[in-house]
């Protein structure tokens, strides 16, 4: 809320969201769980069912097994979060456990969008290619929500994934929701990933994308003086 207030007042702000995973060490177990093996073979229909699962009525989600007890301060997690945590706990770990980068990327390409939030309708979604920091083509996706008033603020978003996993497609549901909830365009950046492109390639791409959006802001009806940067996890570090 404080960040959005700063954005409304014309100040550039940044935010990050990080969530600990697994057993707290940050390292996944050496073998994939049975559920994760199944998710690797998920069909589009099964992915749609996963999305439906986390959108069940709150009483249904809370009563699946009685739900966890409220926290010590009397609060409790949202029912959607409780359900997802239960599914991840049954899976054995919340992070990909593949033996290779390619396998891990294949897994998150299925599981992350499937567990994404309900996406609101957009006025428009546009993919374009801009130069990355090395001068090569880099995907940039712009989400334009309905009912915006120009000139509008905007958000340049960098996806998470430990600088190795994820892309603008794995985070498509999240960035659509950000655009819809914020009521402003969101630009999602497909920056280069390690290990193929080690640090600081991704960070330099993030800077290049932000600069490009500022230069081209009028094309999207965006006020170049009110552009925020943000992301989740690794992208939040950028």
Image (spheres, grey):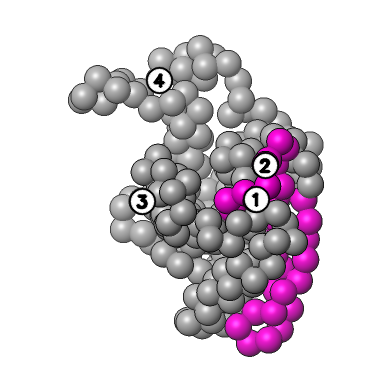
Side of 104 relative to 64 (left or right): right
Q: CA distance from mark 4 to mark 2?
A: 43 Å
Choose mark 3 or mark 4, whichever is in front.
3
Choose mark 1 or mark 4, whichever is in front.
1
Q: Residues within 10 Å of mark 3 (few under 14, many from 20)?
A: few
Q: Residue furthest left?
A: 72
Q: Which residue is mark 2?
A: 149
Q: Relative to residue 25, is residue 122 depicted above or below? A: above
Tell me the quadrant of the picture where the N terminus can be found. Answer: top left
* Sequence order check, earlier mark of 1 and 3: 3
Q: State if disc 4 and disc 3 touch (CB < 8 Å).
A: no
Predominant secondary structure, magenta span: strand
Give the residues drawn in magenta, as a range: 125-154
Q: Was residue 145 drawn as part of the magenta stretch in this picture?
A: yes
* Sequence order check, earlier mark of 2 and 3: 3
Q: Which residue is mark 3?
A: 20
Q: Which residue is mark 4?
A: 67
User: What is the secondary structure assignment of the residue under circle 4?
Assistant: loop
Q: How many marks?
A: 4
* Sequence order check, earlier mark of 4 and 2: 4
Q: CA distance from mark 1 to mark 3?
A: 38 Å
x 21%, y 24%: residue: 73
Q: Which residue is mark 1?
A: 151
């Amino acid at each position: 809320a404080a960040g959005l207030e700063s954005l409304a007042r014309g100040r550039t702000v940044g935010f990050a969201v990080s969530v600990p995973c697994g057993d707290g060490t940050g390292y996944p177990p050496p073998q994939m769980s049975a559920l994760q093996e199944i998710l690797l073979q998920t069909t589009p229909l099964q992915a749609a069912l996963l999305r439906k699962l986390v959108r069940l009525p709150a009483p249904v989600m809370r009563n699946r097994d009685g739900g966890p007890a409220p926290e010590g301060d009397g609060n409790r997690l949202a029912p959607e979060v409780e359900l997802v945590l239960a599914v991840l706990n049954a899976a054995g770990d919340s992070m990909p456990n593949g033996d290779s980068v390619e396998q891990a990327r294949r897994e998150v390409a299925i599981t992350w969008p499937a567990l994404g939030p309900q996406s609101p309708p957009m006025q428009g979604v546009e993919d374009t290619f801009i130069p990355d920091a090395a001068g090569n083509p880099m995907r940039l996706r712009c989400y334009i929500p309905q009912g915006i008033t120009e000139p509008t603020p905007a958000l340049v978003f960098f996806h998470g994934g430990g600088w190795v996993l994820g892309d603008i497609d794995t985070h498509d549901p999240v960035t659509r929701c950000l655009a819809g909830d914020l009521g402003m365009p969101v630009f999602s950046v497909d920056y280069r990933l390690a290990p193929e492109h080690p640090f600081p390639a991704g960070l330099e791409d993030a800077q290049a994308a932000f600069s490009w959006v500022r230069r081209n802001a009028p094309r999207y009806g965006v006020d170049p003086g009110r552009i925020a940067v943000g992301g989740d996890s690794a992208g939040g570090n950028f």
